[in-house]
Amino acid sequence: MQKENLLFGLVGIILGVAVGYFATQSINKNGEVANPATNNAAAPAAQTPAGGPPPVVMETIKKANDEPDNFDAQMQVAALYQQIGRPEKMVEFLQRAVKLKPTNAEALQALTSALLETGKKAEAEATLKQLEKADPKNPALAELKKQLSGK
């Protein structure tokens, strides 16, 4: 009888570890817990339309478009586009940000990188010169110059 209890205990532990592992992987992959009790139709605003961006992303983009003089909103949208690998849209919002704050090193550095990524070397070179004037000790200058020269 004791061997049987030990076997059941061992099988229970193994199953518990396996279920825990796969549940954790699912949460890490999806970024949310799949809980049917909380995922109901009572909160349609929190649900993502099939194939579309989450509502918070749409709100951020809308804010940047509605408030073209909001530097932070332009930078936030640029960061969102960077995360999804859309450098051409990133350039659009970073250019808006640089128009608002032409000496902001963070915006100039990000714009230079995005321009290089989209193949706009002449614009990247001009933006890099702006960055150099605004922040001559910026640690990213050497790497950006290297990328611009193609080495």
Image: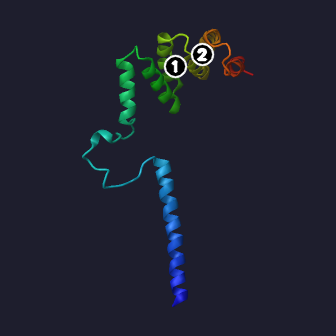
Q: Quadrant of residue 59?
A: top left
Q: Which residue is mark 1?
A: 91
Q: Quadrant of residue 65?
A: top left
Marker disc for residue 52: none
Tag 1 or tag 2, which sits nearer the N-term? 1
In the image, residue 7 sits, relative to residue 33, either above or below, namely below
Disc 2/disc 1 C-alpha distance (Å): 10 Å
Q: Locate residue 17, reporting x and y percent.
A: 53, 66
The amino acid sitting under disc 1 is Val
The amino acid sitting under disc 2 is Lys
On the rendered image, what quadrant is the C terminus found in?
Answer: top right
Q: Quadrant of residue 143?
A: top right
Q: Locate residue 85, reporting x and y percent.
A: 53, 31
In the image, residue 49 sits, relative to residue 20, either above or below, namely above
Residue neighbourhood size for the residue with mark 1, other residues' Cα within 10 Å, grouped as few (<14), some (14–19), many (≥20): many
Q: Locate residue 136, reporting x and y percent.
A: 67, 13
Q: Locate residue 43, reporting x and y percent.
A: 27, 43
| Viewer-nearest of discs 2 and 1 | 1
Question: In the image, 119: left or right of 56?
Answer: right
Residue at x 52% of width, y 19% of height: 91
Secondary structure under the numbered disc 1 in the rendered image: helix
Q: Which residue is mark 2?
A: 120
Work out which residue is located at the far bottom of the displayed protein and give it: 1
Secondary structure under the numbered disc 2 in the rendered image: loop
